[in-house]
Image: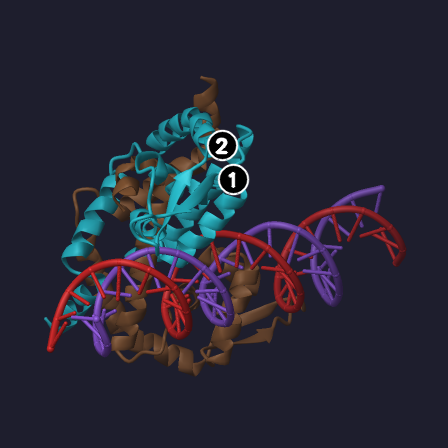
Chain colours: A brown, B cyan, C red, D purple
Amino acid sequence: MNVINESGILAIATRLQRLSDQLRKDGFQIYKANEIDFEPKWFPVIYTLHFRPQLGVVELAAEIGYTHPSTISLLKELEKERIIRSKKDKQDERKRLIQLTEKGKKLLEQMQPVWENMVSALEELTDTSNNIMKAIAEVEKNLDELSFFERAKRVAKG
Amino acid sequence: MNVINESGILAIATRLQRLSDQLRKDGFQIYKANEIDFEPKWFPVIYTLHFRPQLGVVELAAEIGYTHPSTISLLKELEKERIIRSKKDKQDERKRLIQLTEKGKKLLEQMQPVWENMVSALEELTDTSNNIMKAIAEVEKNLDELSFFERAKRVAKG
DNA sequence: GAAATATATGTAGTTAACTACGTATATTTG
DNA sequence: CAAATATACGTAGTTAACTACATATATTTC
């Protein structure tokens, strides 16, 4: 990985992705080591439902930042695992309200201490002179103001 | 994305991936706008071959940080596009040496000014109080010393 | 209130990475 | 030097996201 790491900022997408994958894989191993039957990709759904106990599919998708088809397939898995269930909204017949089951709530409780360990470990890992979470937030803010595409266009013209 | 963004460091993998995707998509649009027939995912291969003009498949894979099957499928695409070609290594008959074609070299030249624009745009985007590239490098260094998994285990025990 | 538009959900197919496994050649070891 | 092991490459199948399209219900507008 020498050339790519030395290529600097051009390889930023590749490096972000690699880091994400690495953390996700370890996350899976951590759940496993704690005998919790849980996949890291389920995290956004479960975590969101913890704070907002009833959400439609599209609302949930928006909340976790995935497209709704991706969310639907996550929900199918979670439904199969009996971690979530859903019911029709009486006000809006198109809507399916997603909720945690009792099993889901128990799982959530089981996971709390593991999450705390993960948070500690991640804080250790990211306790560096440049904080990666803050860096992400700052880049996202800049992107909101003007996209990468628009910036490259402007640079080219200027 | 409110709940997830507020969940802090636990959602780090999700957020890294999302940022990576966003940059990659815009990257594709930038090449397109400059009338260059190039996909961002090809970048690591091309860029590496620019600096190391002859590499075996596994060597190249290691260099770009992908698995070799992923690399093979990238190489197939690039071969179809006539951007790279390969020949047998005379010293080691198992090996297939990958090289840029003339077309590949021309493409590389064409891309130079676009890369410069991208670098400028990315520098703008990442010119923040916490530098994301440095943050990634720092986290990677910490991970090299002790993985996320090992750290979480240690925290749990301690 | 009928037509047009918007919203919520779902399905099908694609993509770009991965793991697992197999084969051929090279290298090391008893 | 034969056997065991390692390395290089390849194929098949999986995964987790995506886009594009379809359908049902709700809301808005003329």
Q: Is residue B7 visible?
A: no
Percent position of residue B39, x then y: 49, 41
What residue do we see at 41% from left, 58% from top?
B69
Q: In the drawing, does residue B77 fall left or right of residue D1?
A: right
Residue type at the position of mark 2: Lys
Percent position of residue C17, x then y: 41, 56
Mark 1 touches mark 2? (CB < 8 Å): yes
- Looking at marks 1 and 2 on the same chain, the residue that comes earlier in the sequence is marked by 1
Residue type at the position of mark 1: Arg
Residue at the spot of label 2: B103
Q: In the drawing, does residue B25 fall left or right of residue A126?
A: right
| Number of other residues with Cα within 10 Å of mark 1, as a class: few under 14, some 14 to 19, many 20 or more | some
Q: In the figure, residue B8 lies in which quadrant?
A: bottom left
Q: Quadrant of the C terminus of chain A?
A: top left
Q: In the figure, residue A100 lies in which quadrant?
A: bottom left
Mark 1 vs mark 2, CA separation in Å? 7 Å
Percent position of residue A90, x then y: 64, 72
Percent position of residue A96, x then y: 59, 70
| Number of other residues with Cα within 10 Å of mark 2, as a class: few under 14, some 14 to 19, many 20 or more | few
Q: Which chain is home to disc 1?
A: B
Q: Regarding mark 1 in the picture, which secondary structure is present there?
A: loop
Question: Residue B82: which disc?
Answer: 1
Q: Which chain is home to disc 2?
A: B
Q: Regarding mark 2 in the picture, which secondary structure is present there?
A: helix
Q: Is residue B120 visible?
A: yes
Does residue A128 lie above or below B144 as drawn? above
Q: In the figure, residue B144 lies in which quadrant?
A: bottom left
Depth check: give the residue in front, B109 or A21: B109
What residue do we see at 17% from left, 53% from top?
B142
